[in-house]
Image (cartoon, helix red, strand yellow):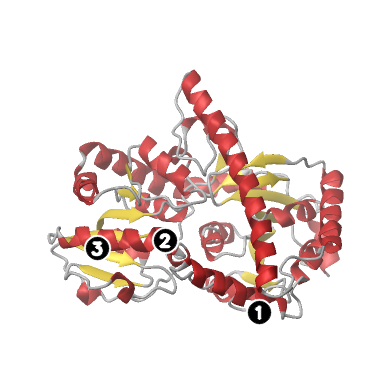
């Protein structure tokens, strides 16, 4: 079969699919990625085909926004500068136009695909792909699906039986809806503010163009019978059907309603270089990373990393490796003690392979890799699905959850010392690691369920491609 993959235009979304793409290739399938040019080199390194789309809408190096300054005024000035640069670009509304013209579905049809796998977070393109005539499956790189039996992934609620658990889940969903409404209102208000500060430069597309895009979207939904439902990220036309994770990591309430493809970790990926000569191998290693884009949340991440450095100075028996995030230098942390190595990015797999503890923001990819190597975790959730992932870590006894802004120095130190030595956490982490490693063969078996019934239009699609 010839299988197309459409990811959300973010590196985390692409990296999460590489293990699945390699598994499909091992079974003799052809895998084609469709995305902006920024991700071409990463995909080609995996041995997959890449088709550049939205070329006029996404200029090169726009997928990774610059790190946000610490000062509120500087962040506003950066937004004004980016708005002016965006408004001066010839194809500034090109993405909306392409969505309105069903551009992506036309491109995928001409490549003779038997199946399209689309990221559930890329909601804008799901209706048109579902209406393209090619079998379409929606996958989740996060454990979010809109199931009302589970709390939303943006909530730290841990479900339990009884009326109290049901009530807490219901409140969490109402809070999620309120935050969604507030976020939409805030974005509109900020767009108006930018228009004033940029002296009338429009930073949102014209209403008529948006109406045309929404009209095309509604027509595709009517044709395919899709209905809108509310999930963690607003209103959705189609929720994820399969998840790139092991079943055992999720809450028990949702397991029967989901298809899990296994760990989906690319353990063979090529990683960045690292100054290994600065690592003392006689000390236990603590790996600290708040994500690739930690620099985009300076008020949350930088103060926390500075506090971790202060704790590290009190624990000379441990070796700390602090990954700062894209665009942030080691000088941002000030003077570092001898047992701290700070880098912009690091070889996460290699570091986790010898780590005794990981301190992470709770991205699902990092959590899965910690579990692969059996590393206990302290999760410091920032946003998106991270609170829900932290709740799952606590529920499965795989680590501890820390409030990055409120935890005091003695508590931070106690958690760092306690977590890797807890017999309960060690036992649960070892069992989960064994389960993750044994799911490699399981992923190959479950691919059959994913592909079932999707080869019906093969000959017609290939004839169209020719």
> In this figure, which residue is indicated by the disc labeled 2?
299
Determine whether, in the image, residue 390 is placed left or right of residue 205.
left
Determine whether, in the image, residue 108 is placed left or right of residue 260.
right
> In this figure, which residue is indicated by the disc labeled 3?
309
- Quadrant of image for the C terminus: bottom right
Residue 107 lies in quadrant: bottom right
Looking at the image, is mark 3 or mark 2 earlier in the sequence?
2
* Of the two numbered discs 1 and 3 in the rendering, the one whose residue sits closer to the viewer: 1
- CA gap, disc 1 to disc 2? 26 Å
Residue 106 locus on image (x, y percent): 82, 64
Is 267 drawn above or below residue 148 in the view shown?
below
Residue 85: give its label: 1
Residue 306 lies in quadrant: bottom left
Residue in the image at 61% along x and 41% along y: 178
> Is residue 408 in view from this perspective?
yes
Q: Classify mark 1: helix, strand or loop.
A: helix
């Amino acid at each position: 079969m010839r299988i197309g993959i459409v990811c959300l235009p973010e590196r985390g979304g692409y990296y999460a699919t590489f293990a699945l793409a390699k598994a499909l290739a091992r079974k003799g399938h052809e895998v084609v990625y469709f995305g902006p040019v920024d991700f071409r080199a990463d995909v080609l390194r995996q041995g997959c085909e890449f088709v550049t789309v939205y070329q006029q809408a996404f200029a090169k190096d726009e997928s990774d926004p610059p790190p946000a300054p610490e000062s509120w005024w500087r962040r506003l000035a950066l937004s004004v500068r980016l708005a002016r640069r965006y408004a001066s670009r010839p194809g500034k509304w090109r993405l909306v136009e392409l969505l309105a013209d069903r551009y992506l579905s036309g491109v995928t049809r001409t490549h003779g695909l038997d199946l399209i796998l689309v990221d559930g977070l890329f909601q804008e393109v799901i209706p048109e792909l579902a209406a393209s005539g090619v079998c379409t499956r929606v996958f989740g790189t996060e454990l979010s699906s809109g199931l009302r039996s589970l709390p939303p992934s943006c909530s730290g609620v841990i479900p339990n039986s009884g009326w109290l658990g049901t009530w807490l889940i219901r409140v969490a969903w109402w809070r999620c809806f309120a935050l969604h409404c507030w976020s939409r209102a805030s974005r509109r208000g900020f767009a108006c503010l930018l228009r004033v500060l940029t002296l009338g430069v429009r930073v949102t597309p014209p209403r008529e163009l948006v109406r045309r895009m929404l009209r095309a979207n509604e027509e595709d939904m009517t044709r395919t019978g899709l209905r809108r439902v509310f999930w963690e990220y607003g209103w959705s036309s189609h929720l994820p059907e399969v998840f790139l994770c092991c079943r055992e990591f999720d809450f028990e309430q949702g397991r029967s309603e989901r298809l899990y493809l296994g760990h989906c970790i690319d353990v063979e990926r090529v990683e960045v270089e690292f100054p290994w000569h600065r690592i003392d191998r006689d000390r236990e290693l603590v790996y600290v990373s708040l994500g690739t884009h930690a620099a985009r949340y300076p008020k949350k991440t930088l103060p926390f990393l500075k506090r971790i450095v202060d704790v590290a100075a009190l624990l000379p028996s441990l070796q700390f490796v602090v990954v700062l995030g894209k665009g942030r230098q080691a000088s941002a942390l000030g003077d570092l003690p001898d047992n701290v190595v700070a880098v912009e990015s690091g070889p996460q797999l290699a570091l986790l392979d010898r780590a005794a503890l990981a301190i992470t923001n709770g991205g699902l990819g990092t959590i899965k890799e910690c579990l692969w190597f059996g590393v206990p975790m302290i999760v410091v959730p920032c946003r998106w699905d991270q609170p829900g992932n932290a709740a799952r870590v606590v529920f499965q006894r795989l680590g501890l959850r820390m409030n990055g802004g409120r935890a005091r120095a003695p508590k931070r130190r106690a958690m760092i010392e306690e977590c890797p030595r807890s017999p309960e956490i060690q036992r649960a982490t070892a069992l989960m690691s064994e389960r993750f490693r044994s799911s490699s063969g399981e992923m190959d078996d479950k691919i059959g369920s994913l592909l079932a019934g999707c080869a019906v239009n093969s000959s017609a699609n290939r004839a169209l491609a020719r």
